[in-house]
Image: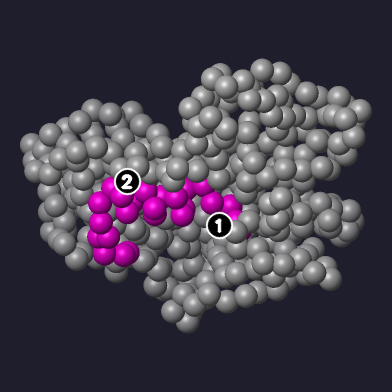
Amino acid sequence: MIEHRLEVADVFRQHEQEFLRQWGHTLNAQQRRAFRDICACRTAALGAHLEQCDQCAHQAIAYNSCRNRNCPKCQSTARDKWLAARTTELLPVPYCHVVFTLPQEVSALAWQNQRLIYSILFRAVSETVLTIAADPRRLGAQIGFLAVLHSWNQQMLYHPHLHCVVPSGGLSPDRARWVSSRARFFLPVKVLGKLFRGKFLAFLASAFRKKKLQFGGTLAHLETPGAFDRFLRQLRSKNWVVYAKRPFGGPEYVIRYLARYTHRVAISNGRLIEMKDGQVTFRRRDSAHGNQQKLMTLDAIEFIRRYLLHILPSGLVKIRHFGFLANRNRHEALILCRALLPTQADHPPDSLTETQRNAVQRKCPICQKGTLRIVDWISAAALIPLGISRNASVGQDTS
């Protein structure tokens, strides 16, 4: 019998009522839905379905998953499917990882205006990277990249930032040749930081003039033009942090990077260590001390509160593509890039482990040849006569 590993859902279920009594009145609709879905995911509460192998007729009953993008278990499968689809889009060149972080002073404003501030963040970052890359003094090329929004740090505190994964080169202005960046250097981070700061604050000032920003609680004083101008001056005086790792390898390395960042939630089940006496212990990386792995313990109610801080507004797209990787021209641009590159990839790298690949392809665990297909659905009510309680759960994602 496989030992059950601690999951975020276990913390949510065990402390559900206590958390709702203390913090329920503060939750918005998206947070309530995420909380409810994570508690119910892959339990009898969501019903089940019958799967059958199309080769050996093996059958199995599996609970339905919630498919909420904030659920750690559902995101692992969504990530694997997304990575498999992205494999064919990778170019045989080194890639760079660039991170743009908002100053702590902007966090409270971002929290109260998430949809607007995140939109400004994506726009400021995309225009910054594309502008600097196109500058003949820098790279002088039209580049493409993807950006992923994260709103947390290793302690699950609110910390909005964008992770960008960028091919280290691009198309010449006349689109007649591939322009490679230097082997150990992509774009200057200080130049990126200054332009990022200028663009973000310009977009923020424009939003203020158009009265699109909300100021509640401790930010109420910023509603006046004078106070907001002083706030902007304070932000202009700061150095805005941009981190860029030097080019780190080709497509096979990029897949590993994407797996870390694209479909993450505030904390993965794999980081959880123990839940005992109303407290949750988990692993965290301490960036201030050489990324050492350390343990951190939080009260279970505080753990849940921090997790729910990072539920994104409904419909907000957190993975976006820019430049020649933008959706409208990605296919044609990739064909051109491959034609111009001196090195051609023999075949796309295998982005998934065998276990991940079998899960995505729904391979039969018995014959290893057939595909599991859903042949019937079982309602939550129908599971009760089978002696299955509403909160009984399983760990395998099958829907």
Q: 10 Å neighbourhood of mark 2: few (<14), some, or many (≥20)?
A: many
Q: Mark 1 and mark 2 in contact (Cβ < 8 Å)?
A: no
Q: Is residue 292 left or right of residue 223?
A: left
The disc placed on residue 369 is none
Q: Residue at x 53, y 37 (%)?
A: 359
Taking depth in this image into account, of 184 and 174 the one nearest to the observer is 184
What distance separates the C-alpha of mark 2 from that of mark 1?
A: 20 Å
Percent across and percent down for residue 201 are 43, 58
The disc placed on residue 145 is 2
Percent across and percent down for residue 179 are 12, 48
Q: Is residue 246 magenta?
A: yes
Q: Residue at x 40, y 68 (%)?
A: 241
Give the residue type at disc 1: Ser
Taking depth in this image into account, of 394 and 74 the one nearest to the observer is 394
* Residue 394 in view here: yes
Residue annotated with mark 1: 151
Please give the count of numbered marks on the rendered protein: 2
Percent across and percent down for residue 234 are 48, 72
Q: Residue at x 39, y 54 (%)?
A: 257
Which of the 4 image quadrants contains residue 345? top left
Question: Which callout, 2 or 1, points at the residue further toward the start of the chain?
Answer: 2
Q: Is residue 7 left or right of residue 323?
A: right
Q: Which portion, as a residue range, is magenta? A: 244-268
